[in-house]
Image (tube, helix red, strand yellow):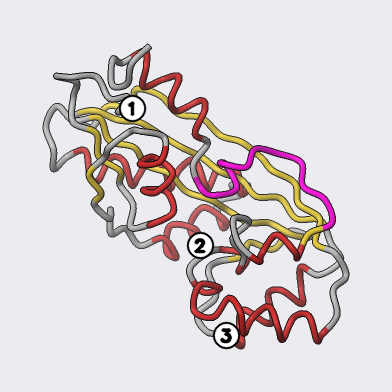
Amino acid sequence: MTATAGAAVLWLASASRTRAEVLRRAGVPAHTEPAQIDEAEIKSSLRSGGANAARAAETLAELKAARVSRRHAGALVVGADQMLECDGVWYDKPRDMDEARAQLRALRGKRHDLHSAVCVMRDGARLWRHGERTRLWMRDFSEDFLDDYLKSAGAEALDVVGCYRLEGPGVQLFARIDGDFFAILGLPLLPLLDFLRGQGAVRT
């Protein structure tokens, strides 16, 4: 265990099992609580206002942290978000397997950018934020591979933007990746740990 005894309680403003697992495996226990914000409406508003995908990820991460921070006085609250952009299109988590197949066909053989943002707040005040861009090149896989992949991934393909988990068979979709592995999982972990050490939330 690397958490500091007596440190402020840490909350993760997310329903993501992957983000919670990343923190747990790093030895940072955190309570989890979904922020329950209208992401679709916020994204639409940001897009119409001219925001880019990186800015959208930062805004969503901060809004999530702010929502949960208001419920837990004195706690450090971590909010995080990701935006996938390819050829100017913003992609969301697929709603069903047909949409997952369509997304993977659209990304096949192309480079896309994954913008990951994290924000930490206490009592509604932003203490820190960080953003990273990862570039990923999907290979030009066959239709047979796509069929096999979606059968193997099952419902998990619907849990993540881009329909892939790099810690599983999803890594086979790619020819090249430039960026941080943890950021792809949805949480830029190393910068976050550095900040939390400065707050006394994990051991130095």
Horizontal side of residue 66 vs 155, given as left or right = left
Alpha carbon distance from label 2 to label 1: 24 Å
The amino acid beneath tag 2 is Ser
Q: Amino acid at mark 3?
A: Met
At x 40% / y 24%, what residue is drawn?
128
Q: Quadrant of residue 137?
A: bottom right
Q: Residue at x 52, y 46 (%)?
A: 57
The answer to which of marks 3 and 1 sits earlier in the sequence is 3
Give the residue pinned by disc 3.
Answer: 97
Name the amino acid, label 1: Arg
Disc 3 to disc 1: CB gap under 8 Å: no
Residue at mark 2: 44
Cα separation between marks 3 and 1: 38 Å
Instruction: Give the mark nearer the N terminus: 2 vs 1.
Output: 2
Q: Is residue 55 left or right of residue 18?
A: right
Looking at the rendered image, the disc whose residue lies closer to the viewer, 2 or 3, is 3
Q: Residue at x 22, y 44 (%)?
A: 31
Image: 64 above or below 151: above
In this picture, which residue range is highlighted in magenta?
175-186
Q: Which residue is mark 1?
A: 126
Few, some or many residues within 10 Å of mark 1 (<14, 14–19, 20+): some
Q: Is residue 42 left or right of residue 139?
A: left
x, y percentage for residue 169? 65, 66
Q: Residue furthest front?
A: 1
Q: Nearer the viewer, residue 3 or 126?
A: 3
